[in-house]
Image (cartoon, rainbow, N blue to C red):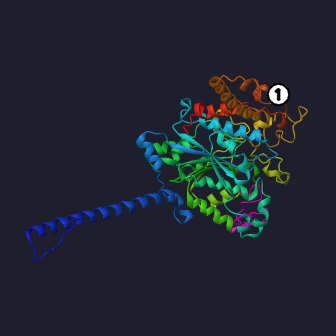
């Protein structure tokens, strides 16, 4: 600032100084006002990017503009999608620790193979791996970190003692698989550094890119490109194509093979594609804390007394998201064809399981989706399947190759149930995972020259046409883990998966 001392009357020099001073003040005021207006615009832009209307029913109207999308377009960088899993336990009766680590390894390789980092994939989307780890599983999470997963350690977002509803508070701990601990999956909504988050269980793999889903989610719904992308999305109900939401907040599939006649279909908790959103996360927590869950198996049971209950996982992440997207935030999600996405090879017809179905003789053979011409997922051609969830067809690392009734089964309680899945189809499904593992093993050998990856990692002789040397006997005990050193893993992350950090 210009400083001066006034003495006596004014002079032309003093008037000139005053004039200069006024100009400086004016310029300074204009700069301050401009900075203030820019700050307001930035705040409004960030609020639009990361929030939704306070009314959940208005979520579909909210436009979430990602700065990452804009910067990707401007710099020609591919858009990076977050792929997340949740680790709630280090092992359970379904899987050994080595099996879970190999599952995470093959899962990551399948993401890589279906991304832009693999030129043969045809995809234009990049990826980043995340593991949402419950505090109870933190001790084994470093193994995922070695594979390039970015670790997010969290406690359950809602403690059982916070739940106000008596029935849910007293019983949620009994829910398959993990009670209230399973709610850590909701942290997927808080991974804000990406425009899209894909969350799956660890017993999962990708067979084809999902560019059509991402395009339909990110491109303007009324643009030519957006319309073309929406036309390619494989829906569970084709007649709902015209009513797809303008702003797609999530893609999901339903657990139809659990449906009770006349009841609501639960969400299949092993797979969801979502737009990260803090307000959605917080609304979920409000619903859990309220604990409005009605006991029983009637049409008025479950979440909100709306029929979202009575099946495996309904008190946790099978029933809750179905209730949320149907009742709290309707017209914001899209239901995908469950034979193509999140494929489980499950029987979704009313047949002989569970036992109570026997009294509904008029429904036998009919589709549990209550439509004609239902696709039989036990017969879906492998070339049509986008990704696979290893449930009804069992875990590939559990070497479930015994065919009940045709041979003496030695594995413990993990055989293909002919009532809920087709044995031959499940062998094709299992082979797809072992082919993906074999592809990774071959690439590691080509880079490192370490022949032990094959000589020790593929030494199994049990049904080699399916398990490709990764099983030495039927059952979990027969699994042959991936034979790689820590150095091999580091090379894989850097050279094969092209991880920069």
Q: Is residue 456 magenta?
A: no
Q: Please indicate whether residue 311 sits to the left or right of residue 144 in the image.
A: right
Query: Magenta-highlighted stretch: main secondary structure?
Result: loop
* The one of 416 and 262 positioned closer to us in this rendering: 416
Which quadrant does the C terminus fall into? Answer: top right
Taking the view exactly as shown, the residue that stands out farthest to the left is 12
Left of 79 or right of it: where is 440? Answer: right
Magenta stretch: give its range.
290-317
Question: Mark 1 Cα within 10 Å, few/some/many (few <14, many 20+)?
Answer: some
Instruction: Report x, y in % for residue 60.
Output: 53, 58
Dot 1 falls on a residue whose secondary structure is loop
Q: Residue at x 73, y 24 (%)?
A: 452
Comparing 340 with 461, the one in front is: 461
Is 277 rendered above or below residue 439?
below
- Asked whether 336 or 436 is in front, the reply is 436
Residue that mark 1 sits on: 462
């Amino acid at each position: 600032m210009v400083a001066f001392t006034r003495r006596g009357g004014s002079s032309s020099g003093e008037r000139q100084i005053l004039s200069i001073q006024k100009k400086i003040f004016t310029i300074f005021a204009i700069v301050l006002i401009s900075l203030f207006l820019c700050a307001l615009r930035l705040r409004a832009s960030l609020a639009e990017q990361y929030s939704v209307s306070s009314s959940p029913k208005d979520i579909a109207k909210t436009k979430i503009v990602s700065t990452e999308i804009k910067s990707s377009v401007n710099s020609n960088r591919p858009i990076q999608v977050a792929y997340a899993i949740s680790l709630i336990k280090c092992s359970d009766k379904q899987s050994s620790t080595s099996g879970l680590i190999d599952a995470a390894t093959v899962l990551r390789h399948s993401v890589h193979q279906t991304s832009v980092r693999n030129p043969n994939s045809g995809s234009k989307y990049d990826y980043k791996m995340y593991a949402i780890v419950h505090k109870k599983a933190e001790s084994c999470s470093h193994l995922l970190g070695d594979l390039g997963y970015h670790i997010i350690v969290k406690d359950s977002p809602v403690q059982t003692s916070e739940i106000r509803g008596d029935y849910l508070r007293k019983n949620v701990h009994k829910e398959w698989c993990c009670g209230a601990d399973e709610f850590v999956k909701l942290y997927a909504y808080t991974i804000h550094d990406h425009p899209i988050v894909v969350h799956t269980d660890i017993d999962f793999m990708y067979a084809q890119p999902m560019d059509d889903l991402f395009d339909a989610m990110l491109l303007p719904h009324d643009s030519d490109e957006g319309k073309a992308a929406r036309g390619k999305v494989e829906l569970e109900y084709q007649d709902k194509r015209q009513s797809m939401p303008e702003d797609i907040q999530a893609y999901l599939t339903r657990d139809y093979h659990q449906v009770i006649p006349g009841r609501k279909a639960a969400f299949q908790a092993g797979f969801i594609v979502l737009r990260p959103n803090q307000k959605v996360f917080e609304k979920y927590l409000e619903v859990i804390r309220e604990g409005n869950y009605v006991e029983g198996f009637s049409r008025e049971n479950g979440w909100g007394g709306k029929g979202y209950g009575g099946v495996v996982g309904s008190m946790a992440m099978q029933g809750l998201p179905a209730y949320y997207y149907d009742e709290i935030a309707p017209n914001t999600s899209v239901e995908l064809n469950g034979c193509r996405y999140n494929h489980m090879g499950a029987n979704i017809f009313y047949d002989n399981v569970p036992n109570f179905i026997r009294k509904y003789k008029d429904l036998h053979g009919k589709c549990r989706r209550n439509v004609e011409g239902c696709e039989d997922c036990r017969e879906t051609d492998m070339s049509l399947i986008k990704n696979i969830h290893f449930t009804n067809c069992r875990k590939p690392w559990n070497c479930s190759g015994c065919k009940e009734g045709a041979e003496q089964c030695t594995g413990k309680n993990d055989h293909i149930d002919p009532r809920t899945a087709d044995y031959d189809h499940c062998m094709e499904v299992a082979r797809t995972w072992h082919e993906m593992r074999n592809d990774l093993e071959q690439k590691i050998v080509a880079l490192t020259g370490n022949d032990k990856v094959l000589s020790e990692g593929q030494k199994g002789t049990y049904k080699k046409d399916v398990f490709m040397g990764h099983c030495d006997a039927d059952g979990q005990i027969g699994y042959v883990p991936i034979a790689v050193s820590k150095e091999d893993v580091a090379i894989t992350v850097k050279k094969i998966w092209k991880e920069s950090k």
